[in-house]
């Protein structure tokens, strides 16, 4: 015994509106500000460096390590 073929439901949203919505959420339009020059994440606007907060912290930590190692070498 076969089941009856279900009629295709009419779309609730017109295809034109759906396509326009998809284009408006494209990944290119989601980028709000400048991106990090190291990892590509969003950076805070108004900061002089093109680094995100993670890369900035890593940079500061590396500087501190270098400063601590320099007196030991002298």
Image (cartoon, rainbow, N blue to C red):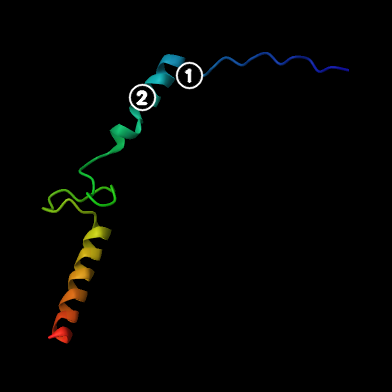
Residue sitting at the far front: 73
Q: Nearer the viewer, residue 29 or 63?
A: 63
Labelled pair 1, 2 in contact (Cβ < 8 Å) = no
Which secondary structure, mark 2? helix
Can you tell which quarter of the image residue 30 is in?
A: top left
Q: Identify which residue is drawn at 15% across, 77% down.
A: 67
Which secondary structure, mark 1? loop
Can you tell which quarter of the image residue 71 is in?
A: bottom left
Q: Residues within 10 Å of mark 2 (few under 14, many from 20)?
A: few
Q: Which residue is mark 2?
A: 23
Tell me the quarter of the image containing the C terminus: bottom left
Q: Identify which residue is drawn at 46% across, 15% down.
A: 15
Q: Nearer the viewer, residue 34 or 63?
A: 63
Can you tell which quarter of the image residue 1 is in?
A: top right
Q: Identify which residue is drawn at 81% across, 18% down.
A: 3
Mark 1 or mark 2: name the one nearer the start of the chain: 1
Left or right of 74 in this view: 11: right
Residue 50 pos. (x, y %): 17, 50
Residue 25 pos. (x, y %): 36, 31
Q: Is residue 18 above or below residue 51?
A: above
Q: Residues within 10 Å of mark 1 (few under 14, many from 20)?
A: few
Q: Which residue is mark 1?
A: 13
């Amino acid at each position: 015994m076969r089941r009856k073929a279900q009629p295709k439901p009419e779309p609730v949203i017109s295809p034109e509106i759906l396509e326009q919505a998809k284009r408006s959420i494209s990944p290119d339009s989601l980028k709000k500000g400048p991106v990090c020059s190291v990892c590509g994440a969003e950076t805070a606007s108004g900061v002089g460096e093109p680094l995100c907060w993670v890369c900035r912290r890593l940079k500061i930590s590396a500087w501190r390590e270098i400063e601590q190692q320099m007196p030991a070498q002298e």
